[in-house]
Amino acid sequence: MKKFTCIVCPVSCILSVDEKDNEVQVNGNQCKRGRVFGVNEYNDPKRMITTTVKIENAKIKRLPVISTDEIPKSRLIELAKELYKITVDTPVLRGDIIVKNIGETGVDIIATRTII
Amino acid sequence: MMEKRIRKIIADMNKIADYDISASVSRDKIVTLNGTALYWKQVVDAGHKVANVKGVRNVVNDMISKDIKPNIIDYSKKIKEVKNNSISESCDVVIIGAGISGCAIARNLSKYNLNVMVVEKNSDIAEEATKANNGNIHPGVLAKPGTLKAKLNLRGNEMYTKLSEELDFELKRTGSLLVFYNKKDVNKFKILKFLKYTGIGKLIKPLSQAMKVPGMKWLNTKEVRELEPNLKGEPIGGFLLTTMGLVEPFEVCSALAENAAENGVTFKFNTQIIDIVKEKESIKEVITNHSTIKCQTVINCAGVYADNIAKMVDDCFYTIHARRGAIAIIDKNRKGYLNTPVGLMSDSDRSNNSKGGGASVTPEGNLLWGPNAVEVYDKEDKSVDAVDMDYIIKLGRGVTDEVKKSEIITYFAGIRAADYKEDFIVEASRKVDGFIHVAGIQSPGLASAPAIAEMVEEILFKQNSNLEIKSDYNPIRVAKPKFRDLSHEEQDKLIKKNPKYGNIVCRCELITEGEIIDAVHSPIPATTIDAIKRRSRAGMGRCQGGFCGPRVLEIIARELEIPLTKVTLKGENSYVLHRQSRV
Amino acid sequence: MNKRQVDVVIIGGGPAGLAAAIEVKKQGIDNVLIIERDSSLGGILQQCIHDGFGLHRFGKRLSGCEYADNFIVEVKERKIEIADKTIVIEITKDKVIYAMNEIDGITEIKCGAIILAMGCRERTRSQAFIWGTRPSGVLTAGTVQRYINIEGYLPGEKAVILGSGDIGLIMARRMTLEGIEVKGVYELMESPGGLTRNIAQCLVDYNIPLHLSTTVIRTHGNKKLEGVTVAKVDKDRQVIKGSEEYIECDLLVLAVGLIPENELSNQLNINIDTRTKGPVVDEYFMTSMEGVFAAGNVVTVFDLVDYVSLTGELAGRGAAKYVKGQLKMDKPITRLEPGENVSFVVPQYVRKHNLEEKLPLYFRVKQKLEKVEVTAVGNDETYYKKKHRVVLPPEMLVEEIISSNIKEGDKKITVNVMEVSKE
């Protein structure tokens, strides 16, 4: 049995996750999303990635970005480093795709701020 | 007689603890101590005991203790390197140290046809004891009668009025209040009052200094209350020393330095004296970490390092021991809580709260507690410890007991440069022509600074009869506008004239970008975040630079045309930013 | 000097101010002005690039920037006037504001109502009483966040974080991702200051150690930070002698708490609650000065931005009503007081006749308790009861009382959090 802290919402439920008869069972969650998180965390933990990329010709020097979905936790540092090589130019609109399908994960990296 | 007394003191000390102190006395009555004690405090005690012996001119205390790690830096390599690189400059007078003494002297000398250079190892003026001072222009009651300190304190205090007018810095003559709480003391103070008013007190030696101080006023219970309604408990009465003045020490120092610079004095920062070269017992040149400077006169205002400098010309007859003092600043919510600095008069009141009591105020009306006094070996140790804070809180709450520890917005420490006679040393070297000692300048050094400068001017005048006052000497300095002190109409006009005054950088203290730019480009340029803070007050408020820090950093970088990573908090390697996050 | 009149002025264009402005406009007041000192709206959210915002309001985990953007877009759509790069330097008792910027100089604004939405600021090194020298390399977490996320600079290579509040935890992860070695997070208290999920995703995920009942007692280095001394503390938060440890670092990040920003409120001499450190407010978050409202972290430091927006909207509705003369300012009032195991309650008092359908109460518990019941008790009646599995001081509680239940004559309602007796 493994224990995880659910990070889906601020309630931060403590989940006990176990595998029985090829089925992952989650206890301690208070909502459905918690169960999904528990199963994922047991099989293949995933996280959102938020960081910045360099932006030119703007008042601020870094453009904040986010992943459109969660990516494998084990690849967080590697993909963050990948993003550090990127420079974008203005204008950027919130939601603009900065990297398509980053590291073949099927997840895009998008801008979270409009900078004109 | 003197030597016998010293031998007795040394023998007693060696007996009590397992020391191996030895003393030697020179012909001019300088005592040199050697040996190892257990604790640094004992080293300092030994110095004081010997210095107190009648007839002793001063003490060179070369003792060490087992609780310290001596840090001696060998400059011989650097000296050779500088001598070889042959960057050579010249001037008439080199002033070592840009603290309050150095800057006051520089300003006095700037009126003459002299080429004066002030050499400072830090990146700014006032970086040591001066900036960590509580800003009291003491009336001169506390100085020991007959000392140089006593004389210069009285004279300096008097000179401040004219000085503040010429140099446009704030001076508030609030007076200072000494109160007592114990009924038993009523008679004692009645006698004091009698002695003062009749003039008889002047004849009693221990009282003579206090009795010389002008403007002492006796206050009864009601008058004390009226003056200071927030004082702790029920004070019975006290003395108001009306000549006490309050200043911002940095403001005074920068006013002096700016005026000196405007009258032609050169200030060299980040420049440390590593050697002084004599020729036939006359000054030839000083060697800094950058260059050699040929000169005729060296004025040693090096504060805690004055003894090291004096050693360079083989005329070190004193040792400077570092006495650290911490000060705590109270939130401006308490502005106006006290009108004057307040202390306790009587020993009986001091014993009541075991540590005495005292609180001061800034010219702005903000409350401050401290300083305390702790002997430390390391002349750079400007740390503040829990024990220091406990002490100054007790000190402060001894008279302002409603104010809580949580109301402290910041605290810091400075080092006083004390010699073992605990007096000022302002004199021409008896051994080296052109070398002037200005050493042991501790409290009341700020109050005495104008008088010290006057005295040095006289010494120099005696040595050099060709001195002439420059025709274009201008003793007037005009301070830059302080945005927050202006009316809204005046503020509006100022912004229309220069839009940079319309951008508030420090919200807590209401400091504009215009004022920060003024500070960067002032006659004594501010090149660090702390230097900006001291000149403009940006970062001095409640958030302590949390909000304005990054903005000030950016303005400095822009104005000096340097990368953000090269801006420092306080000179040397005190960078704030390590590197850009992406290349 | 320019002079003008505005119905409702909102000071601060962060989450509270944006929500308040939108609400005022929705209520039919057109003459609305947001005064923002920065060049862009959104306040501190613009440097909060991490996700986790807006789960309540938008049902999604947005980044701080995205959360702010949702409001900024609406403010612009509704054509609400914004004075950016403008700062308020004075508010007078008759609701006159003096604002200034580089272009217009000083502007005198006569206001119908004012909403204070200046947010909060960080506690400093001095307030945490850290001893030692004062070198560079000691920065608050918010300042570090700004340097890294907005300016693109790293303030050090090896960091120690003091304080395990959410900002401290978020910055531990952020610095790690940027290549700064985070040597540990130190927390004076016995339990972490931040949300449990942030311990998991910011520290555990990156193997960053959390040291509880341990604090930074001393900084070393005269010019640049060379290291810190940390030490364990006992139950009374006194340093345990012999537990001191030196840690080499060039950056000490302080996440030692936030304090409502009330520099301006203090000018007005409005009543401040010593527990929240913010103004005492009523049912519409009006302060003790009639027509001056407060919203968001000015009132008390909330842990979720969703609550900040809600209080902004409430204050916005209140200000609109006030300007229209629809608020009855007469008594009686009912005080809301912290009872058993509750450290404060916001709002501090209400007038029943002005209440909306539901009255939300924001409060924190004093200590961690399990299996508790929250109650709100009037003179002789319990208005509200709810059970919780676990309550923690870092996690603010919000409970809504049905307003119609409250009796007209009640002088006070006490909010309690008590353990349910084990039967």
Image (spheres, coloured by chain):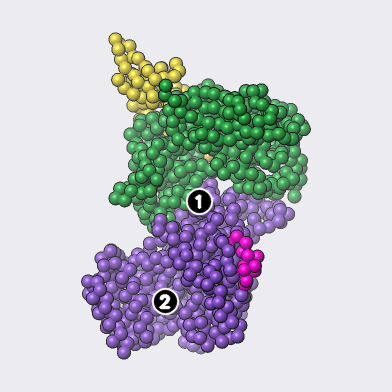
Disc 2: which residue: B422
Q: Which chain is purple?
A: B
| Residue B406: image tag | 1
The reply to whether the magenta stretch includes residue C59 is no
What amino acid is found at the position of numbered circle 2 in the picture?
Glu
Give the residues in magenta.
Answer: B219-231
Residue C36 position within the rendered picture, expressed as x and y whole percent measured from the top left: 63, 40
Quick one: label 1, few (<14), some, or many (20+) residues within 10 Å?
few
Q: Residue at x 44, y 16 (%)?
A: A32
Q: Residue at x 40, y 36 (%)?
A: C191
- Colour representing chain C: green
Residue B332 position within the rendered picture, expressed as x and y whole percent measured from the top left: 58, 54
Q: Chain of mark 2?
A: B
Q: Is residue C194 visible?
A: yes
Q: Which chain is yellow?
A: A
Residue C285 position within the rendered picture, expressed as x and y whole percent measured from the top left: 65, 35
